[in-house]
Amino acid sequence: MTFGQWIGLLVLGVCLYILWEIRQVLLLVFLAVVLATALNWLQLQLQRWGLQRGRAIAISLSMTFLVVIGFFWLIIPPFLQEVRQLAVLIPKGLAQLEGWLNEFAYRLPFADFADRPLLNRLITQLEPFLEQILNNFFALFSNTLAVLLNTLLVLVLTVMLVLDPQPYRRGFIRLFPAFYRSRIDMILTESEQALLAWLAGTGLNMLVIGMVSGVVLALLGVRLVLANAFLAGLLEAIPNIGPTLSVIPPMIIAFIDDPWRAVAVLIAYIVIQQLEQYLLVPVVMAKQVALLPAVTLVSQIVFAIFFGFLGLLLALPLVIVGQIWFTEIVLKDILDRWQPSPPPEASSPPILPLPPASPPAPATPAASDSIPEDDAEDA
């Protein structure tokens, strides 16, 4: 390798290291882009209804701020209060579980009471493990300052992108060669449409699941219905993993009050998810970019490992946008146009030019047709 190639490789390594160090900021920027895409679509719809652009943007931003303020005012305080109560009531719940299991064992005709110490040891070892899982699960909500700062950064970036998105779009397009900029503009438009389709489908899922979960929890008498219903709707944005996580808090709360109620909550959530798979998913997936289930699950695990909860939340839109860029640039523009070179022709001896044709000889009369001179004179 030449010295210039070594310098280029070093610069590439430094750039990758810097991108890795600011990965959380890049994820927050991507989240702001997703929100700005949704708000831009909303203000365009308001303009079509006759509103001016300034008023449409003001209404869109006002709705966003109301949702964020309502989240931090109505949801977070009671949710944190209930988490503190759970930290106190979990040992009581485990003791209640032990007593319930002991009572159930007494009623069994074939029960061997010699196994009860083993059960007690199992519950004793399970108690700190459950407390650790609960503390890690709600660690996101405990660091309030970091959540507020990240939320503020996302909101500021979203407002900037909504007010005047074209300079940012043109600046991004200018990073590519001049002959390819129109193609990048088309890919950005396609990515925007795919994000809007995902937002519409996911928003419909979140709204329906949150409302149905709230109604079911209210009918079962589970405490903190609003927070649990909101959590169920919010985690619906994370396929496969989100619905599993959303059932844990209401089950713990229900089990503290009554064990059968926790079982009822689990059954109700399973029924809700099955109805979603058969009723909502066919309607939603008809508008979204088709993704293989294995790709969705693996991408969620990978993004959760490397980027944490924010990566898990944004895994699906990142995969949707990444699939579009990979398909359009790598597959269509590179691989599909990569034609094999024609095979070399078989070697043959050179063709020599023909020699020039000789002029034709003058015609001579035949011997039988000639007349002797003496005979001609005699005639």
Image (cartoon, rainbow, N blue to C red):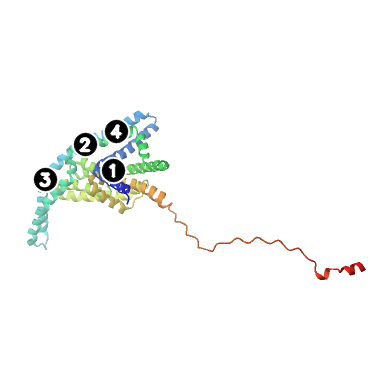
Point out the tag, 3 or 2, that comes first from the N-terminus: 3
Pick whichever of labels 4 and 2 is earlier in the sequence. Answer: 4
Of the residues tagged 4 and 2, which is closer to the observer? Answer: 2
Nearer mark to the viewer, of 2 and 1? 2
From this view, report whether residue 366 is shown above or below residue 73. below
As drawn, the label of residue 63 is: 4
- Please name the amino acid that badge 1 sits on: Met
Q: CA distance from mark 4 to mark 2?
A: 20 Å
Q: Residue furthest front?
A: 374
Q: Which residue is mark 2?
A: 149
Of 241 and 332, the residue lying toward us: 332
**Where is the C terminus found, in terms of image quarters?**
bottom right
Kind of residue sitting beneath label 2:
Leu
Q: For mark 1, give the secondary structure.
A: helix
Q: Earlier in the sequence, mark 3 or mark 4?
A: 4
Is residue 314 visible in this depiction of the protein? no
Question: Residue, x 41% and y 40% (percent of image)?
Answer: 178
